[in-house]
Image: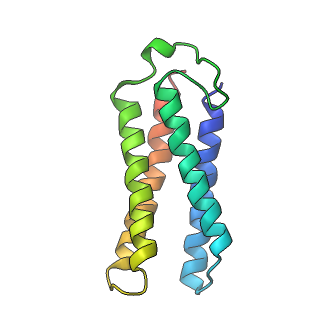
Amino acid sequence: MKAGSVGLVIAAAVVLGLVLGWNYLKGIRNPVLNGVHLLLGAGAFEGVALMMHGRSMLGEPLEGAESVGGSMGGLVLAMLGIAMLSGLIWALVRGQWRGGTSVLVAHAGVGTLVLLFFVIWAARF
């Protein structure tokens, strides 16, 4: 299952996001973990984009590649983009705007939905 590597990257980003969220609630900041979280999200975005074009993260063709794209893959890719954008917005406004925590909650919710929808989409492979 070559879609599994993309799923692992998404799952790692979600788990690390949970750790970062817990640390945020305790008042702990770790910029290195934030950077790793960002890189995992970018890798997930690239992996889903490759899957939509019928390739794995290693560049190998996927079985059933002629029907890989579709609306569900586009939804996962769009939601990943929204999660990345909301994380960036939160990082920019976290100390200056009172609504910053709601942006963080939206970021976490969309990221978790990305994992759920990816699993549903990747189950076709």
From the viewer's perspective, is residue 38 above or below residue 66? below
Q: Quadrant of residue 36?
A: bottom right
Residue 93, position as x, y percentages in the image:
39, 79
Q: How many marks?
A: 0
Residue 16, position as x, y percentages in the image:
63, 61
Q: Quadrant of residue 56?
A: top right
Residue drawn 58% across and 46% down? Answer: 43
Quadrant for the C terminus in the image: top right
From the viewer's perspective, is residue 66 above or below residue 41? above
Q: Is residue 72 left or right of residue 112?
A: left
From the viewer's perspective, is residue 118 above or below residue 96? above
Residue 111, position as x, y percentages in the image:
46, 54
Quadrant for the N terminus in the image: top right
Residue 11, position as x, y percentages in the image:
60, 49
Foreground of the two, 50 or 124: 50
Foreground of the two, 79 or 113: 79
